[in-house]
Amino acid sequence: MRAIDIRLLRKKRTGDETVFFNLTKELLAIDKEHQYLLLTDENNPQEIALIQARLGCVGQKNVQFVSLIGKNRFVWNLISVPWFLLTNKVDTYHTQYILPFLVPQRTKVLLHIHDVSFRAYPKLIGWKDLFFLDFFIPRSLARAERILVPSQFTKDEIVDYYGVAPEKIVVISNALGEDFLVSGNDVSPLLVQKKYHLPEDFIVYIGTLQPRKNIPFLIRAFAELRKRLPQMSLVLVGDREGHHVDSGIERALEETGVAESVCFPGYIDEHDLKGMLQSSSLFVFPSLYEGFGIPLLEAMSQEVPVAASDIPVLHEVAGEAAAYFDNTSIASCEEKLYTLCTDREQRARGISLGKSRLSYFSWKKSAKTLLALYETLV
């Protein structure tokens, strides 16, 4: 039996939820032979039914949902999952970052690590989270049979920071979510603009508002852009009340005086994201550090020009399709934003290259890699 930790599903966790949802969905679609146990901390039958429907596994005989006690991560890792693994013959267990306190030796562990920003930029992490990660991550990496990462960049980072053997780490690329692949039944851009009270002309960012996302820097670059394009607004899609939000955002808004031109629509429903991107003038991704960068693919799929931070992993994702800027230079960022807003030739080039770039990434291909990995471990 193969157990997958799906606690992330329907938790509005953006990136890592997208990864586990799409990999699990594709895995269950291509493997009807082996038994899968989907471990969740959800015990509401209606909610589980919704997850089951979204995964497309209703009535699938080789799939079983298992509700465990553990809304608190400590209860989950110290009691619920260890007891379940000890009392059930589970061949493989697939989770992310932190392993349970005790995993039987008979169970092979696949550990998903999306990025190691907490090692690269420890000062940007809350001290409690940093202590927790510093204590548990090395132990989890050592116990795992295989470590799954979304990019070669993240693989290299884990090797450098933790001394893990490269052959133990497998790159399983992220890709576009299903909502961006299926045409038809799209919500119109105009309706999305009305629903979320969006401005007419805007640049958009999608992601968390944590310090490593470099949002105060973006606000300052946008303030400079407004001097040349006073009609332009900035839309920051992310949870303003979420975990570890960058306190510098409010300070940047106050110091630049552009608060009235910056919109925070909060969490956007998956089926509305396409309409939002289609409404935008361009997409910007100013991160200091990433493990992959799914929003780049989402923007390119909607024929939106992309301006991105000049860091290795984003080159790995977007190739030549993005316009890159120095994420420490406000002038560099402002110039790229201005060019993509005004230069039709540059916009058309980015859109064309973005379309061709999408073919490099596929959840189905990644799920096949994951399935083959399961086979080698058991």
Image (cartoon, rainbow, N blue to C red):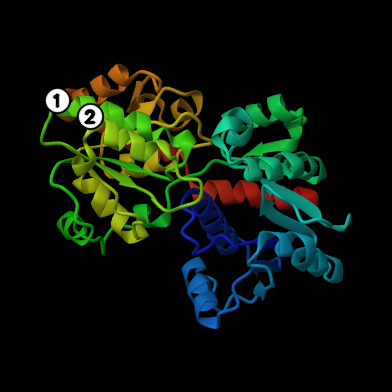
Give residue 3's quadrant in the image: bottom right
Give amino acid for label 2.
Answer: Ala
User: In this orientation, which residue lies closer to the viewer: 180 or 74?
Assistant: 74
| Residue at 35% from the left image edge and 40% from the top image edge | 250
User: In this orientation, which residue lies closer to the viewer: 222 or 169?
Assistant: 222
Q: Is residue 195 visible?
A: yes
Q: Is residue 356 left or right of residue 140?
A: left
| Residue at 36% from the left image edge and 58% from the top image edge | 270
Q: Is residue 242 left or right of residue 72?
A: left
In the rendered image, the quadrant that contains the N terminus is bottom right
Provide residue 27's location: percent of width, then percent of height.
59, 58
Provide residue 154's location: percent of width, then percent of height.
60, 32
- The residue indicated by pointer 2 is 223
- In the rendering, which numbered label is found on residue 227? 1
In the rendered image, the quadrant that contains the C terminus is bottom right
Mark 1 Cα shell of 10 Å, populated few (<14), some (14-19), many (≥20)? few
Mark 2 Cα shell of 10 Å, populated few (<14), some (14-19), many (≥20)? many
Q: Is residue 247 left or right of residue 112?
A: left
Q: Is residue 1 above or below residue 134?
A: below
Q: Is residue 111 above or below residue 185?
A: above
Q: Is residue 291 above or below residue 94?
A: above
User: In this orientation, which residue lies closer to the viewer: 28 or 190?
Assistant: 190
Q: CA distance from mark 1 to mark 2?
A: 7 Å
| Residue at 87% from the left image edge and 58% from the top image edge | 104
Give amino acid for label 1.
Answer: Lys
